[in-house]
Image: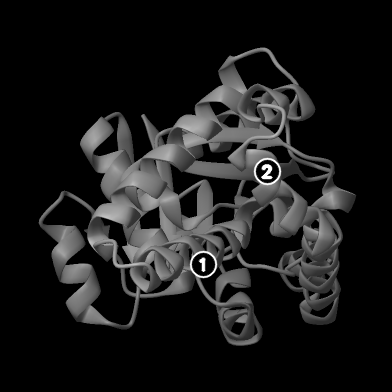
Amino acid sequence: MLKIGFIGAGNMGGAIMGGLAAKGGYDICAFDPDREKTAALEKKGVRILDSEESIARECKYVLLAIKPQMFDKVLPSLAKGVTPDNVIISIAAGITEEYIQSICGAGTHTVIVMPNTPFLLGEGATALAKGKFTTDEEFAAVKAVFETGGIAEEVPMDKMKEIIAVNGSSPAFIYLFAKGFTEYAKSVGIDEGAALRLFAKSLAGSAKMLTDSGRSVDELIKMVSSPGGTTLAGLDGLYEGHLVDVVGDCCSRCTKRAYELSK
């Protein structure tokens, strides 16, 4: 049975623990100073420990489900219990393997992870990078943890800041895109709820076409675009607005901020 300890029991940490508890086969421990959060997890079979250090001493795998600004406080406490046998997993934007090792030890085994919020519904898309000293077996175990809430893909360590725009932050960008469609629907007298459901299903179906149809993005666009039809008229507006360039700029800004937060 794989033993894994969590530091932080917020939305993402709680969702991962809940998924693992439901799946079974995991010995799960957690520490969070907020007893209200841990009390709910305790009912699901999660063992609550009293410190970061105790998590490291009790569990081989330690998952840091905390905000980047908390690392300076948490890592020194965690380091007191870290041994060469531990694997430290971070899901915080901008946190690097080198930073973790600078506090927990130069040879610390790490996995750097970027999940996204659809994990909460079992529809997550998680990117993971294997640390320098982490074994293939350890990495596979961590990858399996995140596959309980969706798909997980390995990404090179030096691209973990760039991938944030693609899967970590992209749900927010998609929601803003959706807002444009629902606000248009409302402006022309269509029920907003009906429009949202129709657009969301169109989005889900389009995603399925991207992954399962075997067609390229350009081929899929062409499938919807009849000559002289409504789709081409709408696409003209997006091309004139340089949508692809706007998305590229959005991703570049996201990545730039990840580097600014990096430590």
Q: Nearer the viewer, residue 63 or 51?
A: 63
Inspect this view and state whether residue 26 appears: yes
Q: Which residue of the protein is positioned furthest toward the left in this rendering?
A: 43
* Quadrant housing residue 131: top right
Quadrant the N terminus occupies: top left
The tag earlier along the polypeptide, 2 or 1, is: 2
* Quadrant housing residue 55: bottom left
Q: Do the numbered discs 2 and 1 sit on residues whose CB atoms are within 8 Å?
A: no
Residue occupying image coordinates x 27% and y 49%: 18
Measured in 3D between alpha carbons, the distance from the residue under mark 2 to the one under mark 1, in whole angstroms, is 32 Å
Left or right relative to 260: residue 91: left
Left or right relative to 174: residue 215: right
Badge 2 marks a residue whose secondary structure is strand
* Quadrant housing residue 108: bottom right
Residue occupying image coordinates x 80% and y 75%: 262
Amino acid type of the residue that numbered disc 2 sits on in the rendered structure: Leu
Residue 83: percent from the left, percent from the top? 64, 55
* Residue denoted by label 2: 128
Inspect this view and state whether residue 90 appears: no
Residue 165: percent from the left, percent from the top? 72, 59
Dot 1, crowdedness within 10 Å: few (<14), some or many (≥20)?
A: few
Amino acid type of the residue that numbered disc 1 sits on in the rendered structure: Gly
Circle number at residue 263 = none
Left or right relative to 231: residue 31: left
Q: Is residue 149 above or below residue 56?
A: above
Left or right relative to 222: residue 80: left
* Residue denoted by label 1: 180
Badge 1 marks a residue whose secondary structure is helix
Q: Is residue 199 above or below residue 216?
A: below
Q: Nearer the viewer, residue 258 or 246?
A: 246
Q: Which residue of the protein is positioned furthest toward the front in this rendering?
A: 228
